[in-house]
Amino acid sequence: MELENRLAGLLTAAGGTRVVTIDVSLVAALAEALAVDPAELSATVRALVEEYAGPAAVFGIHRVDWRVDLPPATARAVVSDALATTFLRWFGFEGHPIAGLSGAGNPLFSVDRVEIGTAVTRLHCTASHVEPGGEQTNVIERLEQAGLRPSRGGEITLRPPGSARTIQLVCRAPVPPDRVKVFVSYAHDDEAHKVAVRTLAELLVHNGIDVDLDSWAGPARKDWGSWATRCIESADFVLVVASPRYRHVGDGVVATSDNRGVQSEAALLRDRLHWDRAVWTAKLLPVVLPDRSTDEVPLFLQPYCADHYLVPALTQSGIQELLRTITAQPGHVRPPLGEVPVLPPNPTVAGEATVQPLPRMVRPRLPLVPVENLDPFELDVHRAISMDVGDDALPALPRYVTRPHDRKLLENVRQAIAGTSGIAILVGSSSTGKTRACFEAAKQLPTGWSVWHPISPTPPQALLDGLAGVPPRTVVWLDELQQYLLTAGPSLGEEVAARLRALLRDRRNAPVLVLGTIWPERMQTITSVDPAAELGSHTQAGQLVKDVQIAVPSRFDQAELAALGEAAQIDPRLRQALRTRSCEIIQYLAGVPAMVERYQVAPAAAHAVIDVAADARRLGYAGDVPWSFLERAAPGYLSDTEWQATGEDWFQEALGFALAPCRGAAGLLVRRRPKPGHNPPGDPGYRLADYIAHWAGGRRSFDVPPVAFWDGACSHLDADALMVLAGAAAARGRTRHATLLYERAGALGSFTAYAHAGRLYRESGNARLAEISFRRGAEAGDAAAQIEVARCCDVRGDTDEAERWLVLATEQGDYVAFEMLAQHAESAGDNVRAEHFLREAAAAAGIYRGRPLRQLARLRAEAGDAMEARELRASADKGVKTVVRRPLHDSQQRSGGAAELERSLRRTIADAEAAGSRPSSHDLELLSEVCETNGEHDEAERLADQAARAGYPAVYRSLVAARGNRGEVRQAEALAVRAANAGDAESLWMIAEACRDDRRWHQIRHYGLEPDGTPSAAWW
């Protein structure tokens, strides 16, 4: 029994443990039960461990007393295939490839359970979906002759030579990969109720549902608690059958000695529901059988405010509602949206109106502020430092000194006054005067102009909602432009950029002036192109900001300092800034030195609170950080010693330190007034000072926030924030936390998150969980998820269901869905329909129309219409093109040789740094590659670090590849982890793919990294 229980644990990979142990004692006991030579079985196990988990020598498995710790799924595969291989050898296939170790596992059946009696050993298996062909043809034929059909199941009984023991292989028919699995949880109220439950289960099985029911679990003695746990955890749905006894058990009003089995099940279901309410609310289906009542549903399943399923009769029609839910086939599908009618006005009191006014578009009312009434602080201009005396006599802002970027900005203002719409984006580091410059420019506009600052409910959504109502002579104020363009879902930011471009081209609304500010690294994200991507993620945004950027230097030059000296004669704040003999005047006026000093001397708890806010901002979340999130995440930044030293009021004290003003300017943190619909009462939001966000963020570029940060985000942030941080976690190879954040965002209503989570599951190797996630998003109406479900259906050959999902996606205008429908039609030989879908795709794709147009051109050429094919290819060439960086040798040739290229790059970088600007990430990347080629590896890394801090972590890819190709594996791995920590995990996945036979990298490939950089344990 001990061996049987141990095998049960191995073959179910249950228990939630990180590793499972296989050792020589297990193999010896199993060899005795199977009547085989222990040395032979041990050799089989060793070979399988080598195949699935890396070279055996790594684990010391060749010792006499060997043992090996494996992830549960790997341990299950090793034991199952060892049993299957042994059985096939008994059956006469010694040395045959099907009984060997191909690395793909046994393709005919998998062993689920082993029963070991005194004279009989039974292997309970599940057959696989296989058809005769190739090397397995004669194996399948021999098995069928003996009574087992891999496609249908069966039973074979053997007696190994020289043994009194009988071996039985009991194989059940395979469960198709798309078959829904259901567990039935019920109380044994009486015999009639048990019969009714069994009848319901039989009806479901007849309708293709794979049901686990205790009556069908077999006669062998078993641990029912473990059996129920395995069934519940593996089920897609759990049916909780209402009855008086189950209601009493679920409500906790029975003695602990009564109905222990259903008490155990109900307790587990309550626990899973509490652990993830969104997932388990959908999985737990209360069922009310005939002659039963909703009052018999346990209260924890919310019988009156959540769905329950009435079965009026135990017939096919009686279970239809339940069957529709289990199989995701709704009875009513919303039709596509029609056109909004144009309705004439009602007749006047005196009779029918003689003149019917034309319908007109009603513009949304925007919160416009006339330029003469502008408040600089409402537009987020930084407050200046205060003086010890005389503050009341000073203006709110220091006297302004015009600089070169102001003159460029003023040209845009003149064109707007003349009637031409325009856009100007000021690019500079934090606290360099970008927002103040925009404010001064707006003040130059004449009366009649207004400013619109879209911020609520979220900046990008506010902008989209209000763009149709922007009147002429409006300044669209986009301070911190990344909030509008670098959204969690790139499609939202792309729509914002496309709508802004349309606004600027629309002469009916002219003149409109768009003013924006952004940090250089954020602009780099918008304008850079990933060579691995077919299309840039921010194509519309890149077009919007092209040729309209105005650089704002972080330092004053000598001429500007001289002009400042004149202004300083009447403003003591400017005089004090000049006395520092620093060229960073704006930073000083914004209280930056005092802020940095205060940050550096902050107590540990205050430092932790500030770092939480800095990390949230650095990872892309620009919104207000809730109080509850700061309190939950900050302890993770403290060492055990620091945490033990904190008092009961540690958080209030830390927050008070961070909020205290710095020389009259804002503190390190600023409490923000909640916007309508944001931050519930009692959970105020905080914003980190811009310069500290920039300064601290740069110093933490290679730090990944601790577990408490991600857990706190999951518990306390809204869906928009979760989407941003989930993307940041995924980009850093923290797959487990990214998936949790996406799933939480989906539960909060951001349904596109399910598509992101599904892709992470798929890339990790779990197709089943991927499809479950895709289906959640698809059923909620997300087009991206609907397309992913269609791809899953295509993989298993279910074309009809795939096309149903694609049609739903096309109703939302998704051009990819049209493309896939075209592929289906072409595969079916219907090129006419394929052309129709491709034309629809091109119409819906906008600037991405090149691909469907090229496919359409190919079909027209095949049809003999060469003229239209040429026209279509010409149109395709006008769309978005892939941009790929030139190889190093090509750049060297174009620059006049390697030495000249290096000199040119160093000169360009030095000039940018001397001017107080950031060097181009492209130049840093190219020079880093030059240094690596020249053997200057430390310099190559320094330049790569500089580019990564500027927002371009993909710079490490060429260095990782170069060192890997030279056999410098440790150095390549270290750089790949550094790149992942900075926000680019591609090098990490590249190494994991190349080292898939290495146990550690196999684990990283499937489960990602933990925040501390260690490989994540199996989590799905």
Image: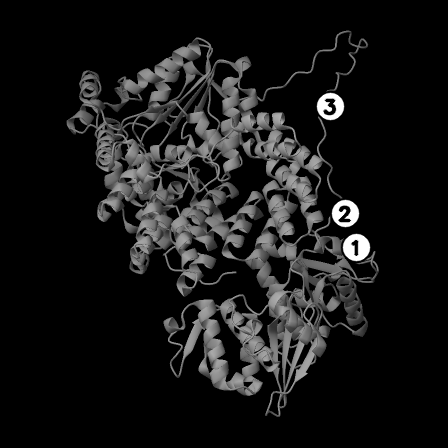
Circle 3 residues within 10 Å: few <14, some 14–19, many ≥20: few
Q: Cβ–Cβ below 8 Å for labels 2 and 1?
A: yes
Crowding at label 1, few (<14), some or many (≥20) Cα neighbours within 10 Å? some
Considering only vertical position in the picture, is 321 above or below 859? Answer: below
Residue at 58 percent across and 75 percent down: it is 84
Residue 3 picture quarter: bottom right
503 with respect to 183 (left or right): left
Q: Can you see residue 203?
A: yes
Q: Earlier in the sequence, mark 1 or mark 3?
A: 1
Residue 1 x, y percent position in the rendering: 57, 85
Question: Could you tell me residue 325's position as x and y percent?
Answer: 72, 53
Q: Amino acid at mark 1?
A: Gln
Instruction: Name the foreground residue: 613 vs 92.
Output: 92
- Is 745 displayed left or right of 427 in the figure? right
Instruction: Determine if residue 1010 is in view.
Output: no
Furthest-top residue in view?
354
Residue under numbered circle 1: 320
Measured in 3D between alpha carbons, the distance from the residue under mark 1 to the one under mark 3, in whole angstroms, is 37 Å
Residue for badge 3: 341
Label of residue 331 in the image = 2
Q: Residue at x 72, y 73 (%)?
A: 216
Q: Secondary structure at mark 2?
A: loop
Q: In the image, what residue type sits under mark 3?
A: Pro
Q: Secondary structure at mark 3?
A: loop
